[in-house]
Image (cartoon, rainbow, N blue to C red):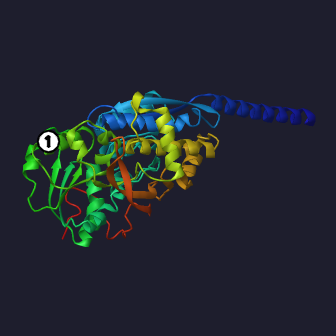
Amino acid sequence: MKISKRFAMRSLLGAAALAAAMGSAWAQGQPLKIGLLATLEGPFAAGGADGMRGAELAARQRNNTVAGRRIEIIKASSNANPDVAVNATRKLVEQDKVEIMVGPLSGGEGIAVKDYAKTQPGVTFINGSSGAQAATLTNPSANFFRFNTDGAQWMAGLGKAAFDKGYRRVMIIAEDYAFPYSQVQGFMSSYCRLGGRVPLKAWVPLGGKDYSSVIARIPRDVDALLVILGGADAVNFLNQYEAAGGDKPMMGGSITVSQDILNYRGRRRESLVGTMAGSPTADALDTPEWKAFVADYQRAYPVSAGGYPSPSLFAWAYYVNMKAALDGLEMVNGDLSNNQQRYRQALSTMTLKSPTGDIKLDANRQAIASVFVTEVARDAQGNLFNRVLTRMDNVNQMLGMSAADFKIGSRDEPACP
């Protein structure tokens, strides 16, 4: 009787172990579903397409396989509207049953998707290129990660560069939503401390087409303009400013001098040469990691097939975030059990090797990394690119300020005294 019991117990344990092993093998054999969301409609459509290319490149570099599983990327599109972004994300999560989400692109979209992530604890959400501070700084979600620095971090050195160039009074022209608020905060936080003044901020609607009233309001006594417009908005403004005879020196927000803008065809494009900007990337960054990334991008997406001479900011951000998603999976051998706890722990503690240097996350799962002050230049073939003026490493989300001194960007904050 005792022998029979022992035999039965061993049989049960063996069967359980076999079932677990078979279950694990079955899970590893299934495709890994990753949702990928970018704006393929609206003012940032060109940037969204390049963001998709960046994310796909990270998967291609692994032969579209991670931890023994084939990567299945399921794409969705938005138009920079937060509600549209959430609806597209909801479809990927609740209908397509993706296990990991990468996206979205735009600032307000990122805040909305972060809030939606709180309702889906079994899915890990990793940002695309959204740069609004509040996506991670205000009411963060435990399953939302951002491996790209935010819009304020990108502008961390531009205020000093502007002041050093002799720009004492600057007018700001920016789109009226969360990402440009962050960019303005990053610029003004240092510019105002140094003694710079911003006599006028012109907030314009996203997707605007007529900038005549804004151009008419530009004060005669400002030294320069800081233009924080992206995609089609930037192109429309530049063309109209040229037609109006505008001649003020110009600085750019990060997406105002990205490759999707530098490659548009228009006469004003040439006058961008010499434009300073704050950015997480620089086309002419002279490091082996960046050069390898650019070479891989150019091979995969040559200009003749729709790519740019150099990856745009959006391609970099989506690449970095998709690479982080896949590196984390390798670290845990694809283990997404228990609401992906081991996976999220790996993401939280990793040092991501990126084309622009090491990236670590803070307690809110927000990137701490290098940023640049850049200047638009022209190469021998006539292509415009961003060269490096200054590099700043380990820039955190509070820009080195104390919690008491730091205030999140808004329409009115910060303000020069």
Measured as percent of width and height from the top left, residue 301 is found at 45, 32
Report the residue at 83% width, 35% height from top.
Answer: 9
In the image: residue 217, left or right of residue 33: left
Disc 1 crowd, CA 10 A, few/some/many (<14, 14-19, 20+): some
SS label for mark 1? helix
Measured as percent of width and height from the top left, residue 143 is found at 47, 47
Q: Nearer the viewer, residue 387 or 183?
A: 387
Measured as percent of width and height from the top left, residue 31 is found at 58, 29
- Quarter of the view holding residue 326: top right
Q: Is residue 395 visible?
A: no
Q: Nearer the viewer, residue 329 or 173?
A: 173
The residue type indicated by label 1 comes to: Gln
The residue that disc 1 covers is: 240
Q: Quadrant of the N terminus?
A: top right
Q: Quadrant of the C terminus?
A: bottom left
In the image: residue 1, left or right of residue 186: right
Measured as percent of width and height from the top left, residue 2 is found at 91, 37
In the image: residue 185, left or right of residue 298: left
